Image: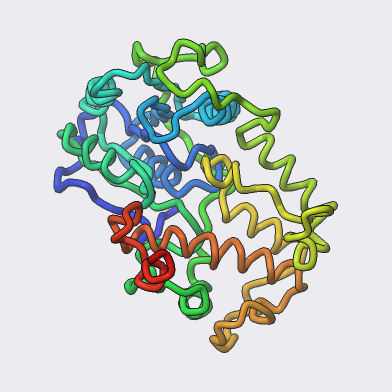
């Protein structure tokens, strides 16, 4: 499946190496084997170059707030991905950091130098973009980051919008074409790739990772909630069957909440916004014809032409959630006081 150009971010001017052994997808944000534009692009490169696809999911220890709870959740997802990729023509491996000063850079370079091209995840918040630049600087082959953050590509809105109502108008004006360019639910369907009978020496088994041996915060322990796409889909299915019908009225009800509870899996990339939208569309028997000629109103109710719960959930997913990504994309210093909107600084002052 072709990935829209708006989602592709070239990080160097180096051409692909036709003599490379494989296409490398270094997975760090969109941690899933489905509904993943970066994976779609990596598959396209592998098919076009008739090379194997090597997917390496990486988890370092030097990210902010690294702790047992977050690590355990991501490791659960790695275990799911091991299982998911085992039934595909791609080769999957895990890289687990141990706290080295230049963590993972040498391991990454040792694999990347053998690649036809390298695909990375593009994410606007936190460490991802500085990390991508550092990784690209070590590459002698083509490096492309791919935006899989939401249904609206980050580069679809060229001007910063700081209010939900303003960003909602952008979404209502521009969304329809992007709904027609959904990432693949079954990205390997009909795909044939050469086999790769090789794994890097650093390949690790997430199931045997000893959290106690890692230089992360051990005071924040794991919780019963399991990470990974399998748990995410089970949670989504339960929500759609039992709480979705009262989401608009009950999502803020403390005693009997109808909130989706999907945030952890969305945050760690185990579940895609596209997949949640697909579940809503199916539940509502909805098609894109409902919005093709719809007038841009900026209203959070009535624009989708579906039930009140569906309207409310999609507004949370595609406006409020993606507004955060939109802000981070347009404001590089979004973690600083100076990066706050003027109205927010005035309020804090």
Q: Tell me the residue at 60%/42% (across/down).
A: 265
Is residue 86 visible in this depiction of the protein? Answer: no
- The vertical placement of 289 against 65, above or below, is below
Residue 344: percent from the left, percent from the top? 41, 68
**Residue 194 image-quadrant placement:** top left
In the displayed orientation, state which residue is furthest to the front.
349
Q: Tell me the residue at 52%/40% (across/down).
A: 268
Q: Quadrant of the C terminus?
A: bottom left
Total label count?
A: 0
- The vertical placement of 79 against 18, above or below, is above
Residue 19 in the figure: left or right of residue 261:
left
Q: Please name the colour scheme applied to the rendered image.
A: rainbow
Residue 50: percent from the left, percent from the top? 34, 35
Q: Nearer the viewer, residue 36 or 237?
A: 237
**Residue 256 image-quadrant placement:** bottom right
Q: Nearer the viewer, residue 280 or 166?
A: 166
Is residue 129 visible in this depiction of the protein? Answer: yes
Residue 89: percent from the left, percent from the top? 49, 29
Residue 178: percent from the left, percent from the top? 49, 66
Residue 211 in the figure: left or right of residue 115:
right
Q: Tell me the residue at 42%/72% (across/down).
A: 162
Q: Nearer the viewer, residue 339 or 129?
A: 339
Q: Tell me the residue at 55%/43% (across/down).
A: 34
- The vertical placement of 219 against 170, above or below, is above
Q: Nearer the viewer, residue 173 or 162?
A: 162
**Residue 135 image-quadrant placement:** top left
Residue 26 in the figure: left or right of residue 35:
left
């Amino acid at each position: 499946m072709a990935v829209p150009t708006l989602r592709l971010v070239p990080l160097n001017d180096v051409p692909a190496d036709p003599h490379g052994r494989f296409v490398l997808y270094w997975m760090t944000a969109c941690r899933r084997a489905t509904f993943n534009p970066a994976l779609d692009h990596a598959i396209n490169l592998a098919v076009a170059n008739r090379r194997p696809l090597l997917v390496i999911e990486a988890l370092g220890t030097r990210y902010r707030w690294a702790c047992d709870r977050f690590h355990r959740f991501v490791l659960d997802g790695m275990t799911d991905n091991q299982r998911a990729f085992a039934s595909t023509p791609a080769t999957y491996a895990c890289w687990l950091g141990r706290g080295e000063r230049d963590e993972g850079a040498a391991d990454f370079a040792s694999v990347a130098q053998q690649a036809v091209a390298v695909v990375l995840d593009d994410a606007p918040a936190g460490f991802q973009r500085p990390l991508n630049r550092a990784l690209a600087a070590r590459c002698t082959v083509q490096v492309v980051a791919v935006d899989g953050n939401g249904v609206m590509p980050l580069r679809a809105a060229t001007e910063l919008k700081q209010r939900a109502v303003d960003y909602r108008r952008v979404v209502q004006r521009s969304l329809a074409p992007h709904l027609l360019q959904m990432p693949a639910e079954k990205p390997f369907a009909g795909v044939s790739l050469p086999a790769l009978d090789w794994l890097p020496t650093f390949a690790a088994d997430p199931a045997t990772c000893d959290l106690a041996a890692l230089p992360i915060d051990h005071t924040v322990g794991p919780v019963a909630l399991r990470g990974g796409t399998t748990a995410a889909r089970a949670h989504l299915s339960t929500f759609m069957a039992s709480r979705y019908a009262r989401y608009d009225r009950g999502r803020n009800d403390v005693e009997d909440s109808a909130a989706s509870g999907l945030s952890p899996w969305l945050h760690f990339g185990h579940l895609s916004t596209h997949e949640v939208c697909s579940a809503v569309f199916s539940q509502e028997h909805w098609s894109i014809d409902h919005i093709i000629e719809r007038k841009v109103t900026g209203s959070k109710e009535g624009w989708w032409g579906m039930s009140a719960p569906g309207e409310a959930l999609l507004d949370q997913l595609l406006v409020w959630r993606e507004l955060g990504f939109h802000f981070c994309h347009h404001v590089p210093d979004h973690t600083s006081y100076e990066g706050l909107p003027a109205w927010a600084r005035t309020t804090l002052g």
